Image (cartoon, rainbow, N blue to C red):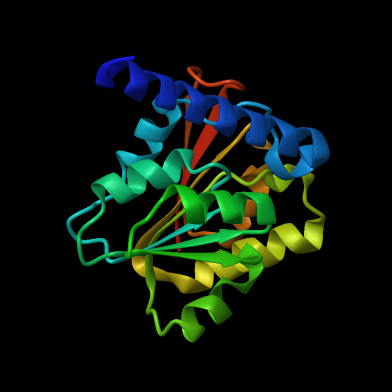
Amino acid sequence: MDEHQQTASNTQQSRRRQFTLFASNFLKHPKMLGSIIPSSPFLVRRMLSHVDWERTRVLVEYGPGIGTFTKEILRQMHPDAVLLVLETNKDFVDYINGAFSDPRMQVVHGSAADIQQVLNERELGAVDYVVAGIPFSTLPDVARENILDATRQVISPDGTFLLYQFSPNILPSLHKTFSQVTREFEPMNFLPAHFYRCRP
C-alpha cells in the first residue's frame, strides 16, 4: 500500500470511528443529540460564515459531539483566540481531547448552564460568539431557560449566539431572552435545520 492509499485508508477508518461513536451515543442518549448523523458541511459553513474571525478572541461551543464544528472553528479562528468547549457526554469529551491537539482549545466536561463559572475559573472575559446545536426542545423548561439566560449574560454587547435546531419550538424562548433574533433555514442537512442568530 503506497502513502496515498494509506492516507485514504486512515481517513476512512477515522470517519467510520466518528460515525460509530456518534450513532452509538445517539442510540443511548437520543434526546441529547437530536440526530443520528452529524451536521452537514452546508450547515457548518452557513453558521460560521457569520463569525468575524479577525476580531473574535473568545469563542464558546456547546455540545461539540465529534467536533464537526470544532474542527472548522479551530481552522479559521485567530492565533490569539480561545475556544472553550462544553460537553456533558464523557465519550465526546474524550474524543475531542484525543482528536484535536490545539493549545487554543479548552475542553470542559460540564453543562452550558455553568458557562459563567467556567469563564471565571479560566479568567476569560466576555464571549464574542457562542455556537450551539444542543437540542433545546428536548430539555426540561428550567434547564433550557437557565442555559439561554446564562448565555445572554456572558456574551459581549456586540457578540452573537449562533445555534441550529431541528424544530422551531425554541423561537419564543429566544425572543424572550435576546433583543434581536434572526432566523434562517438550511435544507442541506439531515435533518433540515433552523438556524438562529441572537444578539443580547
* Front-lying residue, 165 or 61: 61
Tell me residue 94's x, y (percent): 59, 55
* Front-lying residue, 66 or 179: 66
* Front-lying residue, 17 or 79: 17
Displayed quadrant of residue 170: top right
Q: Which residue is drawn at the image coordinates 42% and 20% (left, top)?
A: 9
Where's the C terminus, which quadrant?
A: bottom left
Q: Which residue is drawn at the image coordinates 42% and 47% (left, top)?
A: 70
Horizontal relation, residue 166 to residue 154: left or right: right
* Residue 89 visible in the current orientation: no
Horizontal relation, residue 50 to residue 68: left or right: left
Tell me residue 156's x, y (percent): 37, 70
Q: Which residue is drawn at the image coordinates 52% and 30% (left, top)?
A: 39
Up/down of 34 relative to 172, above or below: above
The residue furthest front is 1
Where's the N terminus, which quadrant?
A: top left
Displayed quadrant of residue 194: top right
* Front-lying residue, 65 or 129: 65
Q: How many marks?
A: 0
Tell me residue 76's x, y (percent): 25, 47
Q: Which residue is drawn at the image coordinates 45% and 47% (left, top)?
A: 99
Displayed quadrant of residue 114: bottom right
